[in-house]
Image (cartoon, grey):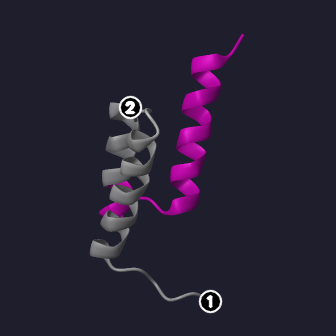
Amino acid sequence: MPAQLTKEQLAENVYQSVHSVEMEGGSVSPEFMAEAREYVNGRINVDQWKEQIKNRLKAKYAR
């Protein structure tokens, strides 16, 4: 089982990911950033975060 990351490491990973998106000309939504804060602060785990993202995008693009 991989070692648990510290809050600082999680925050740095999120920062690097957002920065990468922005360097490619993209942006992240306020909803994404709110979920990222929940993840970094340990209120949700990565699987819950992925599920939230998936559900939000399904709702946004549902036909």
Residue 43 in sight here: no
Query: Which residue sits furthest top?
Result: 63
Between the C-alphas of marks 2 and 1, the distance is 32 Å
- Secondary structure state at the residue bearing disc 1: loop
Which quarter of the rendering shows the N terminus?
bottom right
| Residue 27 locus on image (x, y percent) | 40, 33
10 relative position to 60: left or right: left
Q: Earlier in the sequence, mark 2 or mark 1?
A: 1
For the point 43% across and 54% down, the residue is 17
Could you say which quadrant of the image residue 10 lies in? bottom left
- Secondary structure state at the residue bearing disc 2: loop
Q: Nearer the viewer, residue 33 or 51?
A: 33
- The amino acid type of the residue labelled 1 equals Met
| Residue 33 locus on image (x, y percent) | 34, 43
Is 41 a magenta residue?
A: yes
Q: Nearer the viewer, residue 54 or 20?
A: 20
Which quarter of the rendering shows the C terminus?
top right
Q: Nearer the viewer, mark 2 or mark 1?
A: 2
61 relative position to 41: left or right: right
Residue 46 in sight here: yes
For the point 31% across and 64% down, the residue is 11
Query: Which residue sits furthest right?
Result: 63
- The amino acid type of the residue labelled 2 equals Ser
How many tags in the picture? 2
Pointer 1 residue = 1
Pointer 2 residue = 29
Could you say which quadrant of the image residue 47 lies in? bottom right
For the point 68% across and 16% down, the residue is 62
Q: Nearer the viewer, residue 48 or 60?
A: 60
Residue span colored magenta: 38-63
